[in-house]
Amino acid sequence: MTVTVRSVAHADHDAWLSLWDGYNALYGRAGATALPAEVTAMSWSRFFDAYEPVHALVAEADGELLGLAHYLFHRSTIRIEPSCYLQDLFTAPAARGRGVGRALVEAVYDRARAAGCSRVYWQTHEGNATAMALYDKLAERSGFVVYRRDM
C-alpha cells in the first residue's frame, strides 16, 4: 500500500467527515455528547481560509481516505520561531499498523519546517497505548501534564 499525504480538498468533505466522526467517537464525543454541527462546520471552513492558522492533511491510498491530521501554527513566549501544535490525528481502524499515522506525523513535520517552526508538539490520552507506541518512536515525551477548564 502506498500512502499519499496531502492537504484536504473541498471534494474530501464526506470522507473527511467520516474520519472526523470516528476520531470524535474515540474520545467520547458521539451520540448525545457529539460536537455540535456548527463546530464541525466551522472547523471545516477554517481549513480553506488563508487567514486561519488551522490546517488539515489527509492520508489516502487507492483513492480512499485513511486518516487525517489537523495542526496549527502559533507564537510562543519561549521561542522566536512559531510552534506547531498537532491537534488531531486519526487513522481509520482498518488502516492502523500500515504506516498511515507515521506518514501523517512526518507530513506535519515537513509543513512545520517549511513554515519555519522550531517545534511540533501534541498530546494524547494516557490510555491510548497504541498511539503512544508510535509517538515514542517519532518524538520525546515532554513530561508535562495538561490542565484545562472549559468556560
Image: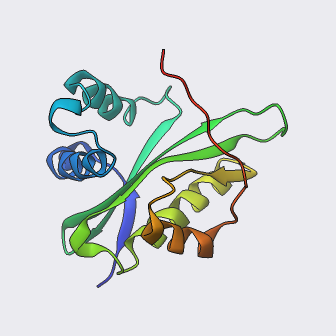
Q: Residue at the spot x=84%, y=38% of the render?
A: 80
x and y, in percent, of residue 140 in the image: 70, 65
Whether 3 is drawn above or below 56: the answer is below
Which quarter of the figure has residue 76? top right
Give how far across and how far down residue 123 sits, in percent.
56, 50
Residue 95 screen position, x and y as percent: 27, 74
Residue drawn 27% across the image and 47% down it: 20
Q: What is the quadrant of the N terminus in the image?
A: bottom left
Q: Is residue 40 left or right of residue 75?
A: left
Residue 83 visible within the image? yes
Is 144 displayed left or right of 20 in the figure? right
Q: Is residue 84 left or right of residue 48?
A: right
Residue furthest top in the image:
151
Q: Is residue 123 above or below residue 101?
A: above
Question: 1 or 102, which is in the foreground?
Answer: 102
Residue 138 falls in image quadrant: bottom right
Kindly identify the residue that appears in the image at 36 percent across and 58 percent down.
Answer: 90
